[in-house]
Amino acid sequence: MYDRLVANGRDHDVVLFGATGFTGALAAQYMKLHAPDRLRWAIAGRNAEKLAALAERLEIDVPMLRADVEDAASMRALAEASRVLVSTVGPYTRYGEPAVEACALAGTDYLDLAGEPEFVDLMYIRHHERAIQSGARLVHCCGFDSVPHDLGAQFTVEQLPENVPLRVQGFVRARLSISGGTLHSAIGAFSRLRQSAAASAARRRLRPHLGARRVRGHVGGPHHEPELGWVVPLPTIDPQVVLRSAAALPRYGPDFSYAHYLVTGSLPAAGAVLGATLGAVALAQLPPTRRMLLARIAPGEGPSVERRRESRFEVRFLGEGGGSRVVTQVSGGDPGYEETAKIICEAAMCLSEDRGLPSLAGQLTPAVAMGAALRDRLQAAGIPFRVLSR
Ligand SMILES: NC(=O)c1ccc[n+]([C@@H]2O[C@H](COP(=O)([O-])OP(=O)(O)OC[C@H]3O[C@@H](n4cnc5c(N)ncnc54)[C@H](OP(=O)(O)O)[C@@H]3O)[C@@H](O)[C@H]2O)c1
């Protein structure tokens, strides 16, 4: 439907914007090891010296582009030089919009690691229609938030009968340490719950009607699951992304519901998780206590190689419908950074290289934009999607 010939005339296939940051540097390392020789990739950032130091440290010889989110002309030039722009410049609520806007205007495909619902909702409100006109695919949440959940739920749905009501539950088990960028993004989001609710309500007013189909989030309480132990509801952006995919794709059936939980194992651990989360939300409300939380890790810092080596994740899905029941699982190593860098780079190469993707534009979820093509890439890259039982 969309003519990608304009974008095909660009200087670079994939550009990593924010490559000097903690996650951006891991993405550059991944591209060095896994990008095919024919792929023309580049790194971009606001600081030329930091870009040069990164290239020297990683021993990569790729073009370096200077762009600052506060300089609109530099953002326009960056978007117009790229076929796929990957932005790891966060917190996105603070820094993210100029890259989305420039890509939506230039017809450039865009990927990010946003986990901030307010940002994603505002980008839908402000740039979705423009991106449809230009042919740009705007795909947020292309890291651990929310690809294993989104593609895992889609994989689960594909194991169940068609055209019947389906119920899917996701159970996340993760061991990880976080970076300064993630801490600052999360605390920023906790401090803006009112604005986030307003953006969500404004988006709901714009969203297309589903006709006779129903797509519902289900928020259960903490409870004990056989085989998994205690679980608590996990109201991250992930269930929102799963439900958006369900709304866009008829394969999820006439009546789809999804619930998303964190596996804590024991009841005391469930209490500790709930207490720590409520405590962080409370401390994020006032500037002095917020500063105290933010001082724990500076932007640019993140977990050591050893910590990342010890980290891993597993998402178990239980799907039911039409008389069938299936248990599936997606798993991998360090979710926060190693696997996130892998996922966003594979997504960038998927948009840039893979034929036969849906001919769509505007704000799209990973499952809608790439679906099985990205899943195949992740399987090959060591993130398995498996059926455990039927
Ligand atoms: N979805 C997920 O699962 C997931 C996983 C990991 C991270 N994340 C998110 O990814 C984002 C990045 O995290 P991180 O730990 O990598 O952060 P980080 O290390 O602080 O990196 C931030 C990057 O943004 C750049 N930047 C800041 N201001 C800029 C400006 N005005 N113009 C251009 N670039 C600018 C920084 O450049 P300088 O180097 O010049 O300062 C740096 O390259 C965060 O929002 C985090 O929450 C999400």
Image (cartoon, grey):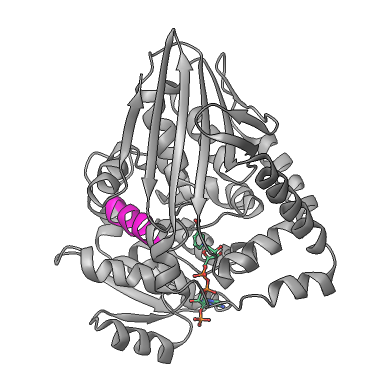
Residue shown at 53% from the left, 47% from the top: 128
Residue 29 falls left or right of residue 75 = left
Residue 48, above or below 272 = below
Question: In the image, is residue 347 above or below residue 230?
Answer: below
- The front one of 139 and 162 is 162
Q: In the depicted view, which residue is nearer to us: 264 or 44?
A: 264
Q: Main secondary structure of the magenta part?
A: helix
Q: Count how many numbered circles sit on residues in the image.
A: 0
Picture coordinates of residue 154, whole percent (x, y): 41, 31
Residue 11 shows up from this direction: no
Find residue 332 and report its horizontal and vertical position in percent.
Answer: 37, 50
Task: Indicate yes or no whether the magenta region holds residue 57.
Answer: no
Coordinates of residue 133 in the picture (x, y in percent): 45, 47
Quadrant containing the C terminus is top left
Q: Is residue 347 magenta?
A: yes
Residue closest to the far left = 37
Q: Quadrant of residue 59?
A: bottom left
Q: Residue at x 65, y 42 (%)?
A: 235
Q: Is residue 226 visible?
A: yes
The percent position of residue 365, horizontal first and vertical second, equals: 46, 42
Kindly identify the residue that appears in the image at 38 percent across and 57 percent down.
Answer: 339
Position of 71 relative to 371 (above/below):
below
Q: Which residue of the protein is positioned furthest toward the top in this rendering? A: 323
Q: Which residues are magenta?
A: 341-351
Q: Work out which quarter of the rendered image holds the N terminus and state it.
A: top left
